[in-house]
Amino acid sequence: MQPTEKRILWVDDEVELLEPHLLFLRQRGYRVDTTTNGDDALELIRRRPYDLVLLDEQMPGRRGLEVLGLLREEEPHARVVMVTKSEEDMTLEEAIGRRVDDYLVKPASPRQVLSVVTRLLEGSQLRQQRAAQDFATRFLELSRAKDEARSWADFFSVYSELVDWDLRLEEAGEQGLLDSVRSILVDLRREFGDYVRDAYPRWVSASAGDGVDRPPLSTDVVARWLVPRLGDGSTLFVVIDCLRLDQWRALRPMLAELFDVDEDLYASILPTATPYARNALFSGRFPDEIAAINPEWWEVEEGSLNSFEDELFRQHLRELVGREVPVHYEKVFSDDGADDLVARVRNAFRGHGVVSLVFNFVDLLTHGRSESTLLMEVARDEPALRALTRQWFERSAVLRILKDAAAAGIQVVLTSDHGSILCERPVTVFARRDATSNLRYKFGQDLRAEQPAAVISVKDESQLRFPPGRLATNYLLALEDYFFVYPTKLREYQARYRGSFLHGGATPEEMVLPVAVLRPR
């Protein structure tokens, strides 16, 4: 491509030897000024802005590293490439420590110099253009794959690719193409809901490996991904509540230097809510199976159903492994006391078993957003929610613990129990006073939705693998981006919850979840 004119300053006491390099850059549209010493370079930089400085390290007078230090004081964000004859590690490390943007060792060819210059000055624009070209090439095939999706694997594949395009095009600033991605996602969401309405009863009535085409479910996670990792030492099992696939992929680059990451996808059971999905994950059982073994648990308030996760988890491991597996289990609601948590986990790593940690921050953020005008503004959409998740993660106890695990050579299984979806459309439901208050799923008697196409309506609890309820109890699960409102509180609910991230229903964002095996590098 022909770059827009950018100004480069090349500082080198042997500048007369660089004529081929200067000509090569100028022919490609760059304006290049030269000087032979650091003092003159600093004076030139004070007079006019430069897009890039190529700085020789070994010059009479001020060395390049000294000039770099002074330049950083005056122009902290200036782009600087250090050019030197020295290949000594100390010189390289000192340059990196002073925040040099790149490093060239003489003799560097004109094309090597151009490569570095292009990456620093045109890289963002080139990545943007490449992303746009790649998506334009892929758009029709992706749309066709969405239209032809017939199996869970088809839907998972299309959704996974849409997540990747969403992240890539957002980074490239391609808002117009992002709208195209999201239009495909709207259609996929609708078709996925129709598919789940028909397929889900078959999924939950079958066991893994019995020939029924179903995805791995919440009940399969521990057996499929965690148990094979168990060995002589410790294994870390991390569950981040309410972490969507796009949020996970926004976090993944932070782990790339620590671990080799193998990612798979599984489907949360319905409702995609913590009391059901996370219990199924830890226990390997559906709600009706848990209630059959411990009927008193099913009688507690819904918010207390997760009080037994550690017990369910230990029992599940015992059944899978055939022996008692030591478990260190903690549920973490905030980073208050993070130092103590990290210390306890480090101590637990010395054992021989599973260190299991549940982090609730993302779920608390999602719920709190509906109640806080400030959070609603800060996390107004999916990119903003991802940004907040990244900011939390990079300063969180989770990342500290993962770094400790990597240093100790401990394998990690990291997953989520359910996701969430940005809800924009209300659907009126008619219910008795006994109905539950959830905004994406409801249980009760004589429940019905004003728009039947907006929900999955279930009258036979066995289709959800729920224990038998009261006579005539039925269930509603929201589809697409709908949320439930009552006719008597229509305006109140619309004003309060429109634009909220909610969960409990049947969408790819809520159901299609990451499970990652992290192997220390």
Image (cartoon, rainbow, N blue to C red):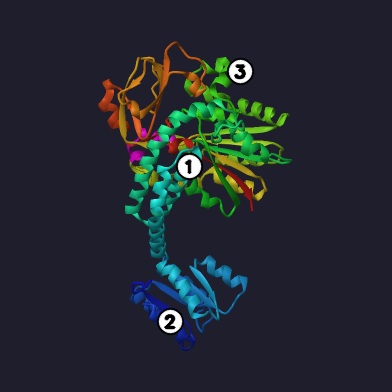
Disc 2 residue type (three-letter): Phe
Count neighbours of disc 3 (C-alpha within 10 A) and say few if under 14, some if 14 to 19, many if 20 or more.
few
What is the secondary structure assignment of the residue under circle 2? helix
State left or right for residue 486 relative to residue 75: left
Disc 3 residue type (three-letter): Ile
Q: Residue at x 43, y 29 (%)?
A: 197
Q: Residue at x 54, y 22 (%)?
A: 287
Mark 2 or 3, nearer chain start: 2
Would residue 319 be seen by someone viewing this image from the given angle?
A: yes
Q: CA distance from mark 1 to mark 2?
A: 49 Å
Residue farthest along the top direction in this orientation: 471
Q: Is residue 375 magenta?
A: yes
Count neighbours of disc 2 (C-alpha within 10 A) and say few if under 14, some if 14 to 19, many if 20 or more.
some
What is the secondary structure assignment of the residue under circle 3? helix
Q: How many marks?
A: 3
* Residue 342, percent from left and from top: 60, 41
What is the secondary structure assignment of the residue under circle 1? helix
Identify the residue position indicated by label 1 in the image. 154
State left or right for residue 392 relative to residue 448: right
For the record, the magenta segment spans 364-376
Q: CA distance from mark 2 to mark 3?
A: 77 Å
| Residue 24's disc number | 2
Identify the residue position indicated by label 3 in the image. 293
Disc 1 residue type (three-letter): Asp
In this rendering, the answer to whether 444 lies above or below 329 is above
Q: CA distance from mark 3 to mark 1?
A: 36 Å
The chief SS type of the magenta part is helix
Q: Quadrant of residue 128?
A: bottom left
* Residue 410, percent from left and from top: 66, 45
State left or right for residue 167 relative to residue 253: left
Would residue 244 be seen by someone viewing this image from the given angle?
A: no
